[in-house]
Image (spheres, rainbow, N blue to C red):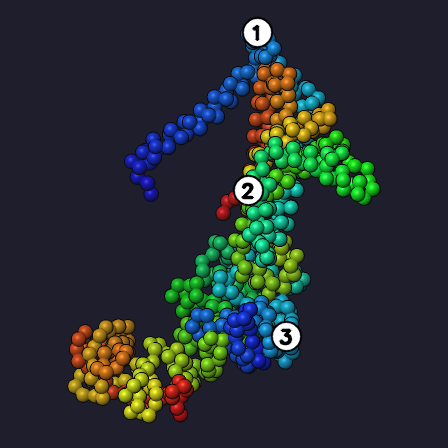
């Protein structure tokens, strides 16, 4: 369609944005790469020297690395599972006509507007606290021993907190998908003799597949880098029970002042994230083709 | 067997009664067309028969049995929707198989019926495509295929041709009529297009505001419309309806004369008028003629080519044998 002339000018006009974005990405990336090959400790400024792959060796052989890797995968998968299944269910409910629909919909979206640190602190202090938390009171009301969520099930608790934050996002996207479902298709399947559960399975879920793909892709990107929720609740502990890769890198570079080791961890995290991205696109990205 | 009886069936949405109590019998094997202007309740009536809407009162009997409370799938009816309502993520084969799969029919019987339906509807080459890869007419045929394989007692069509272009519509009209002759199954067809009604129906039901205005064969409706509404609705172009002194001459409140029942002449006749716009269809020419003292211009049919042009004087003579007379209530005077 476009002429040669208009294509050339389009390229020129879009180039500032592309160059800015490219620089934005490339400069930190190359600095991280550079630091990862240096012995660079903040406690010994001016003593940086090239050490080759030593930083990588230490990071990858650190037992905390594998714990962090497992925790990251568990965290991402756990939250995805809860938000997708819960999101489908909530969207299904919110799609029904009922009194006060508008207000309920806004309330459901609300957790998404609460910033991660705040929501994690609210959960930690108001719900999960073994002495003053609402859950502790609830347990005591039924005559049970209060459960110290963050000490006894730290990763599961964090999965819960993060799921609570991301459920509105999944619900919102899936709700719009439900709303775009052609009612005549549902009526046709009803005439064809499909009971509700089969209509859900054969008509609604396939219709949602594209929206679910979007939810999974976007959430994975953000869930790989969950940090604030861990920092304000468990600090990665007890031990490494709730340390994910992001938190491990933070510990390495800012708690142990080892910028070189932290950078090596960062590079490893980038590589792992790309592997995950490739897998995801292979597995479910085809749903995005019309 | 596919005999559908509506006994005092009514439907109200909240306080708004869209269909006042109504009686209708659809005989086995009949092709019945519900026709009326938009919003007259014809689609609602079809959905009541299908069971997609609950009746507010009255009884629906299918083959003599009360089906008022029967869920849609158990009524033995198949429906073709205006938007085709194909399942976009399934191939044509799976779409057609869906009702049989839901009924738990054996696989080989399913395949046999799919092959037969595909052959009858020229879909054999498209069985493995998705609906998105088909043209409008092909999608329509898939929707019909999905209805056929259930071997229903009756087919329900909800404005199935309104999403097709004009040429395809004429083709599909013939195909559906052909299908009815071959299957001899009851068909109930909803449309707002009176041409479809006239060409396809054994029996036309003309609806207005949820009321049945007249039921009859296409020619009955054409020859003796029961009231002014039916007279104006059936026939293309519309019947000329005149009120005032001209109607008084025939001792009626309204008289109607179809464009094809007015003779034209360039020198003498009952009415003198001026030719307005003329529409040339080749075989026919329709003149819009302004006659002194008449409120609306008359539409007049002339066969072939007639050398009359815009602004010419024309004389018209109605054929009194085909003059329709209506009283003050709009009802036909025999």
Residue at 65%, 33% in the rendered image: A121
Residue at 67%, 30% in the rendered image: A233
Can you identify the residue that label 3 sits on? B67
Circle 2 packing at 10 Å, graded few (<14), some (14-19), many (20+), is some
State which chain disc 1 sits on: A
Disc ID at residue B266: none
Above-or-below relation of A60 to B106:
above
Seen as rendered, the residue at the extreme right is A143
Real-space CA distance between mark 3 and mark 1, rounded to the nearest whole angstrom: 90 Å
Percent across and percent down for residue A187 are 57, 62
Real-space CA distance between mark 2 and mark 1, rounded to the nearest whole angstrom: 47 Å
State which chain disc 3 sits on: B
Regarding residue A65, the answer to whether it shows in the image is: yes
State which chain disc 2 sits on: A
Regarding residue A211, the answer to whether it shows in the image is: no
Above-or-below relation of A37 to A218:
above
Disc ID at residue A214: 2
* Residue nearer the viewer, A142 or B300: A142
Q: Are marks 3 and 1 on the same chain?
A: no
* Mark 2 element type: helix
Q: Nearer the viewer, mark 2 or mark 1?
A: 1
Q: Nearer the viewer, mark 3 or mark 1?
A: 1
Can you identify the residue that label 1 sits on? A47
């Amino acid at each position: 369609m476009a002429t040669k002339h208009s294509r050339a000018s389009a390229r020129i006009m879009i180039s500032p944005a592309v160059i800015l974005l490219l620089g934005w990405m490339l400069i930190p990336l190359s600095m991280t790469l550079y630091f990862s090959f240096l012995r660079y400790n903040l406690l010994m400024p001016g003593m940086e020297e090239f050490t080759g792959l030593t930083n990588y060796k230490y990071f990858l052989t650190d037992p905390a690395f594998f714990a962090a890797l497992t925790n990251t995968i568990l965290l991402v998968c756990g939250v995805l599972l809860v938000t997708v299944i819960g999101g489908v269910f909530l969207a299904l409910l919110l799609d029904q006509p009922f009194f006060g629909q508008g207000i309920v919909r806004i309330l459901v979206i609300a957790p998404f507007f609460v910033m991660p640190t705040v929501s994690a602190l609210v959960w930690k202090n108001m719900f999960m606290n073994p002495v003053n938390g609402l859950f502790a009171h609830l347990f005591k009301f039924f005559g049970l021993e209060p459960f110290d969520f963050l000490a006894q099930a730290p990763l599961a608790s964090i999965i819960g907190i993060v799921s609570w934050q991301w459920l509105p996002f999944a619900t919102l996207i899936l709700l719009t998908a439900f709303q775009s479902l052609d009612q005549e298709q549902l009526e046709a399947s009803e005439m064809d003799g499909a009971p509700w559960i089969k209509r859900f399975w054969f008509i609604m879920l396939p219709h949602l597949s594209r929206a679910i793909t979007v939810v999974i892709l976007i959430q994975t990107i953000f869930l790989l880098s969950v940090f604030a929720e861990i920092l304000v609740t468990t600090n990665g502990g007890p031990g490494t029970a709730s340390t994910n890769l992001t938190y491990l890198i933070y510990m390495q570079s800012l708690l142990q002042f080892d910028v070189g080791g932290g950078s090596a961890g960062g590079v490893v995290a980038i590589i792992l994230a790309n592997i995950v991205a490739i897998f995801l696109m292979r597995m479910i990205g085809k749903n995005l083709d019309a | 067997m596919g005999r559908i009886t509506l006994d005092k069936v009514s439907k109200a949405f909240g306080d708004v009664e869209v269909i006042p109590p109504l009686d209708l019998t659809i005989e086995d094997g009949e092709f019945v067309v519900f026709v009326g202007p938009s919003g007259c309740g014809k689609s609602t009536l079809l959905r009541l028969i299908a069971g997609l809407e609950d009746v507010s009162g009255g009884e629906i009997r299918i083959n003599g049995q009360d089906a008022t409370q029967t869920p849609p799938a158990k009524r033995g009816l198949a429906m073709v929707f205006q938007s085709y309502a194909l399942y976009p993520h399934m191939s044509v084969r799976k779409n057609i198989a869906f009702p049989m799969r839901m009924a738990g029919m054996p696989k080989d019987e399913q395949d046999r019926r799919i092959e037969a339906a595909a052959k009858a509807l020229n879909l054999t080459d498209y069985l493995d495509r998705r609906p998105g890869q088909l043209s409008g007419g092909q999608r329509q045929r898939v929707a019909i295929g999905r209805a056929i394989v259930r071997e229903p007692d009756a087919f329900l069509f909800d404005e199935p041709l309104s999403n097709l272009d004009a040429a395809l519509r004429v083709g599909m009209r013939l195909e559906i009529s052909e299908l009815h002759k071959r299957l001899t199954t009851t068909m109930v067809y909803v449309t707002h297009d009176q041409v479809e009604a006239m060409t396809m129906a054994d029996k036309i039901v003309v609806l207005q505001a949820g009321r049945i205005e007249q039921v009859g064969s296409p020619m009955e409706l054409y020859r003796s419309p029961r009231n002014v509404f039916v007279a104006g609705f059936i026939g293309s172009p519309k019947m000329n309806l005149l009120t005032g002194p001209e109607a008084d001459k025939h001792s009626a409140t309204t008289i109607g004369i179809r464009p094809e029942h007015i003779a034209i002449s360039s020198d003498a006749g009952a009415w003198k008028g001026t030719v307005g716009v003329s529409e040339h269809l080749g075989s026919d020419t329709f003149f819009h003629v302004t006659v002194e003292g008449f409120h609306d211009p008359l539409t007049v049919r002339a066969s072939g080519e007639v050398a009359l042009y815009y602004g010419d004087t024309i004389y018209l003579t109605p054929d009194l044998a085909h003059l329709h007379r209506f009283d003050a209530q709009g009802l036909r005077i025999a």
